[in-house]
Amino acid sequence: MAILFQSEQKRFTLHTKHTTYQMKVDAYGFLLHLYYGKKSDGDMSYLLTYADRGFSGNPEGAADRTYSLDFLPQEFPVQGMGDYRSPLLCLRNAEGVYGCDLRYKGHEIRRGKYGLKGLPAVYASEEEAETLAVTLKDEKLGLSVELLYGVLSESDIITRSAVLSNDGGRDIVLEKVQSACLDFVSGDFDVLTFYGKHMMERSLDRSPAGHGARVVGSRRGTSSHEYNPFLILADRDTGETHGRCWSMQFVYSGGFKGEVEKDQYDQTRFQMGLMDEMFAYPLAPGEDFTAPEVIMSYSGEGFAGLSGNLHRCIRKHVCRGKYRDGGRPVLLNSWEAAYFAFDGKTILKLAGEAKELGMDMVVMDDGWFGERNDDHAGLGDWHVNEKKLGCSLRELSGRIHGMGLKFGIWVEPEMVNENSELFREHPDWALLVPGRAKVLSRDQLVLDFSRKEVVDGIFRKICAVLDDGMVDYLKWDYNRSIANVYSHTANNQGRVLYDYVLGLYDFLERLHEKYPDLLIEGCSGGGGRFDAGMLYYTPQIWCSDNTDAIDRLRIQYGTSFGYPMSAVGAHVSASPNEQCGRRTPLQTRFAAAMTGAFGYEMDPSGLSEEEREEIRRQVTYWKKHAALFHNGDYYRLTDPSEAAAAAWAYVSEDGKEALVAAVLQEVHGNMAAQYIRLQGLTPGSFYQDSESGQIYSANALTDMGLPLPVMFGEYGSYQCYLVRLGEEADGK
C-alpha cells in the first residue's frame, strides 16, 4: 500500500519509491503537515514544537497558549484562524464576513488516481496509483473541502487538488483558492523560478528565500511568457546531481500564483494555486468548485533527479493520445517561408520540397481563411479562402496526401478581429467591458470562452474545416493576453477567467474525442501558455517564437527543469535568424532543434545543394534516434548562461545508449579545451563512439568528462552517439 493510515494517531503516510509524505489530524481536528522528503518509516510528529509565542493567537478550545496555527505546519491553511501567513483559502459568507474553520470529518483511501471534473489531471491505472481523499468541514458555514492526494509510487509523484462544496443554505464567495502548500519547520532554501518575455521564455532565476514573501504569477488570463507555473524550492547547496529539492507544477493554463514565504520563526511555506486578482467565485448552495491540480515531487539527488521524475510523469501520465509515446512527424511550416503571402501553389511547392528532403508533413500557417491577408482582419471567420488558395482545402490536402505527406493547418479559435464577419454578427461574443475603452493587442480581441454558446459556435466552425480538409495536425495559437474581463452572461465577473479556462478545456477535450488521430501543437506566441494543463490536450507546444539556435539553448535549458523535451516544439530556421539577425551554421541550428518535437521553419528552395544534402542527413539522423529523443532520460550537462559550451545528453532508460550534444557559444584564439562531464551512464561499464570507434569508461566520462573537439568559427556544434559495449542499442 502506498497510503497508510494509523487510526490511533490519526496519521497518514504516503510512500513512493524514494519519498515519504506524512500528515496527521491533531487533537483539535486540524490537519497538520509533518514531513515530505527521503523515504522514511516512523512517526514524524516529533518535528512539531509548541510554545507561547505572544501575538500568535490560539483557536477557541485549545488547551493553552502554546497552541497556535500561526506557527504549526498545515495541509490546507485558511484565513481567519489565527494563521497570518499566506493562506490557501480566503472566502466571505453571505453577510460579507471573512474566514472559515475547517476541521477533519473523515477520509477515504481508494485504488487508482482521482480525476477532476472539467480539468486536466495526471492519470494512472489502478495498479500505478492510489488516492487519498480527506474531508474537512466548517459546520457553521456549511462548507466541505475534500483534499485529494494522488500517489504515483514508481514515479515519485504526489498530486494535490481540492473540491469545495457549499452544503449550507447561504451563498459563499471564494476570493482565493490554492491547491497545495508545503510547510517546512526548518531549512535555508533557494527559490527557482522561470521568468521571461515573448521570444525569451523560461529563463532560470535562483534567489535565496529570505524573510518575507517571494511571489510570482500571471494576471494575464494565461500561464504567460513572463512566469511559468512551475517552481522549485532547494537547499542552498543543491546542484544537478546532489542536494534536496521540491517542486510544484500547476496543471492549469490560466492565471496562477506561486508563493514562498519565510516567517518570523524561520519556517518556510511553499504554495501554489489560482491567481486571486480578478477572482471572486460565487458558490451557491449545492454547488462545487474544483481547484486545479498541482504536481509535486521531491529529489534528494539534485535537480537532475527532480526533472527526471517530472519528465516521466508528463510523458506517461499527462500527455495522451496517438502521439504520446512517439512517432511525431518531421514537419515543414510555411510561416517563416511565406508569412501571409502564399497561395495553394506556394503550399504545394513547399510540400514538394518537404518530400524531397525526407520530411513527413507540411503545415499551412496563418492566412488561409476569411479575408486574412495580414493580422488586422479575419480572425473568427473559419471558412477557407478558396479564392486565395485557388482551390478547396480538400483539394489541396488531397494533393499533399497524394505525395505521401501529412497536412496541417494553423488556427487561433479563441480570438476575433473587429474586422470580421463573426464580430459584426456577434459583437457580444468578445470580452469587452460595456462603456469602457477596449484594449487591443495584435488588432484582436478575446472571445468569451466562459460562455458555452461561444465555445459551441467556434467548435462547429473548426470541425467543419477539419472534416472537409482531411487535416492531420493543428497548430493551436493564442496571440494576446486578456485585459477586458466582462462576460454578458456571468452572474459575477469574478468567475469569468476561471470559467474561460474551463471552456477552453471543454473545446480541446471534444477535439481529442472526435479526432483521436489529430496531432495538436499548442502555441501562444510561442511559449506563452507552456504548461502541464495544455500538455494534457496538446502533447507538444511551440517552445518560443524565437528560433535563433543560441537563444534557444537558454530557453530550452530552463524549460527542461519541469518539462520533457518531447513536448518542446523546435524548428531549424533560416540564417541570419529572422528574430535577432544572428548567423549560425546549419548543423548548429539542427543541434539545438533536434532536442524537441522536430521540424523546419524556412523556404528550402533558396538553399544550396550542399545545404539540402545536409538537411537530408539531419532528417535521417533525427528519425534514427527519434525513440531516444522522445523517451530517453534528458540531462543538462552545462548551464548555457555560464558555460562556454552548452551541452546536454539523452540516455536510454536502460542505459544502453546515449547521445551527447554540445554547442560552443564562445570562440577565442588558443582556446582552452572544453570537457563535458556526462550523467546517466551505467557505472562500471564501457561505451563506444559509433562513429570513431573510440571506447570510453563510463566512470571516467562521468568523473572527468568528454573533451570536445577543437572547432573553428563561431557557434560550432558536436554530437556523439555512444553504445554500451556488449549491448545492441535500438538506434545502432
Image (cartoon, rainbow, N blue to C red):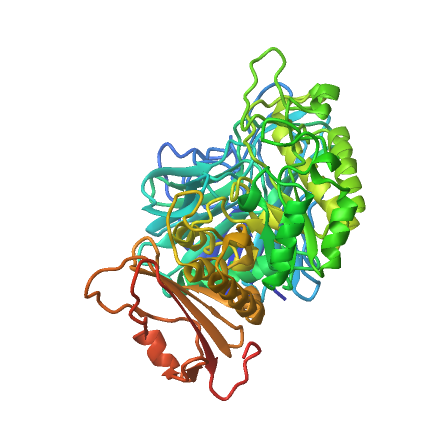
Farthest-out residue, left: 670
Vertical comparison of 657 with 647: above or below: below
Residue 49 in picture, x, y percent from top left: 40, 49
Quadrant hosting residue 421: top right
Residue 68 shown left or right of residue 413 in the figure = left
Quadrant hosting residue 731: bottom right
Q: Relative to the observer, which residue lies in front, 427 or 513?
A: 427
Whether residue 652 appears in this view of the structure is: yes
Whether residue 9 appears in this view of the structure is: no
Tell me the quadrant of the picture where the N terminus can be found: bottom right
Vertical comparison of 238 with 693: above or below: above
Which residue is at 54% across, 54% downward?
604
Q: Relative to the observer, which residue lies in front, 226 or 356?
A: 356
Farthest-out residue, top: 435
Which residue is at 49% across, 56% downward?
607
Residue 262 in picture, x, y percent from top left: 36, 42
Residue 564 in picture, x, y percent from top left: 53, 58
Q: How many marks?
A: 0
Q: Relative to the observer, which residue lies in front, 366 or 52?
A: 366
Which residue is at 53% across, 73% downward?
653
Tell me the quadrant of the picture where the C terminus can be found: bottom right
Residue 467 shown left or right of residue 178 in the figure = right
Which residue is at 56% across, 36% downward?
222
